[in-house]
Image: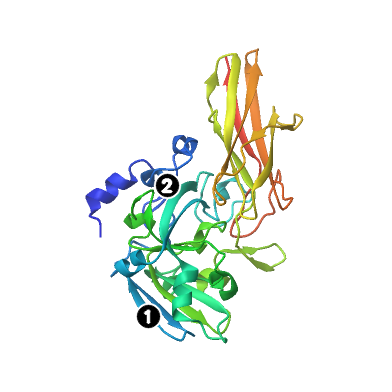
Amino acid sequence: MTGSTNLTSDRAALVTVRARPFNAETPPAALREPVTPADAHYVRSNFDLPEHDGSVHVTGEVERPLTLALDDLRALPASTLRVTLECAGNGRAGMAPLPTGEPWLGTAVATAEWTGARLADVLARVEPTPEGIEVAFAGADHGPYKGGPDTTFERSLPLALAGDPGNDILLAYTMNGEPLTPDHGAPVRLVVPGWYGMASVKWLSTIEVLTGQFEGQFQTRSYVYEWLDGEREAVTTERVRAIITDPAPGDVLAPGRHEVRGWAWSGTGPVTAVEVSIDGAGEWRPVDVEPPTEPYAWQAWSFAWDVAEPARHVLRARATDAAGATQPDIPPWNRLGYGNNAVQVVVVDVK
């Protein structure tokens, strides 16, 4: 476990939302780069940092249960993926009325390069039985949750997805070419591309193939859309979203030409269009979007903005993905404040 001095150094660049358990947003300046440095990548934890012996136990409805040490994982064929991860509660503080939960402003998102063994390869080694239908993933992190009993962070995925040789879910042990840090799940974590970050279980300890649906706290009661009518819906893939990285909110610009740029991503396919509006209710205009360079990473977009007169300007950007989903002006409200992909508003002054 990294000492407290190193943790303080690792966390220095982040925007702290809560000190314990540690939760922090990516600093806006770090979002300008295609790959976010590990020490600037947002952190979401539900409990304090756990101890971890470095082993992953694969058990349940399988023919050959096994325990994998970190060296065993490194001995398997490795894949490296650039993945945009977003906290499911990102932007919660912008919803009204304010939902319960961490008050994320909007920069609980980042992109990193993850290297690890493919989950499908691990499951192939243990051979799930025909009765297996779901796979539960337990982290080493646990503790009392919201005044209740000691609870372990656990999530699940359908076996059809987890065991599909065509998927790119990783048991990752490096981040941006370096070993994982404690805040990012050292020594090994799950990385589920295209899904909100809660699916990418950190400090991965156990993989269990189940014969029924997993009903744990963080699967069926937390990380669910709880609508006004009381209906619940699982939080899964990232909703389409665009952010403006330049200019930054509150910037003061000189008259002239400025490049407005940012990123766009979606968990249901590539982004096919980004539009920008000047001065709030102004007409939406299409801008240049770079084609995806990686299947699970954000795409760059930009346009040249000519502004001649001193004034205050309101910039907005919205994205549309290959599935036809477009960002709303106002997201559907839900009690826990998940999935806020409302159009971002950036106000700048020209003087």
Q: Amino acid at mark 1?
A: Leu
Residue 162 image label: none
As displayed, is residue 236 above or below residue 163?
Answer: above
Name the quarter where the N terminus is drawn. bottom left
Crowding near the residue tagged with mark 1, few <14, some 14–19, many ≥20 C-alpha atoms within 10 Å:
some
| Quadrant of residue 66 within the rendered picture | bottom left
Report the Cα–Cα distance between label 2 and label 1. Answer: 32 Å
Residue 41 image label: 2
User: Please, which residue is most extreme toward the right here?
Assistant: 283
User: The residue tagged with tag 2: helix, strand or loop?
Assistant: loop
Give the image location of residue 109, x and y in percent.
50, 47
Name the quarter where the C terminus is drawn. top right
Circles 2 and 1 in contact, beta carbons < 8 Å: no
Q: Nearer the viewer, residue 154 or 310?
A: 154
Residue 266 seen anywhere in this rendered image of the structure: yes
User: The residue tagged with tag 1: helix, strand or loop?
Assistant: strand
The residue drawn where x is 62% and y is 48% is 95
* 216 relative position to 21: left or right: right
Give the image location of residue 58, x and y in percent.
41, 78
The residue drawn where x is 43% and y is 72% is 138
| Quadrant of residue 279 within the rendered picture | top right
Q: Nearer the viewer, residue 92 or 114?
A: 114
The residue drawn where x is 48% and y is 81% is 127
As displayed, is residue 150 above or below residue 294?
Answer: below
Circle 1 residue: 66
Give the image location of residue 335, x and y in percent.
62, 60
Q: Which scheme is used to colour this image of the protein?
A: rainbow
Residue 215 seen anywhere in this rendered image of the structure: no
As displayed, is residue 169 above or below residue 343?
Answer: below
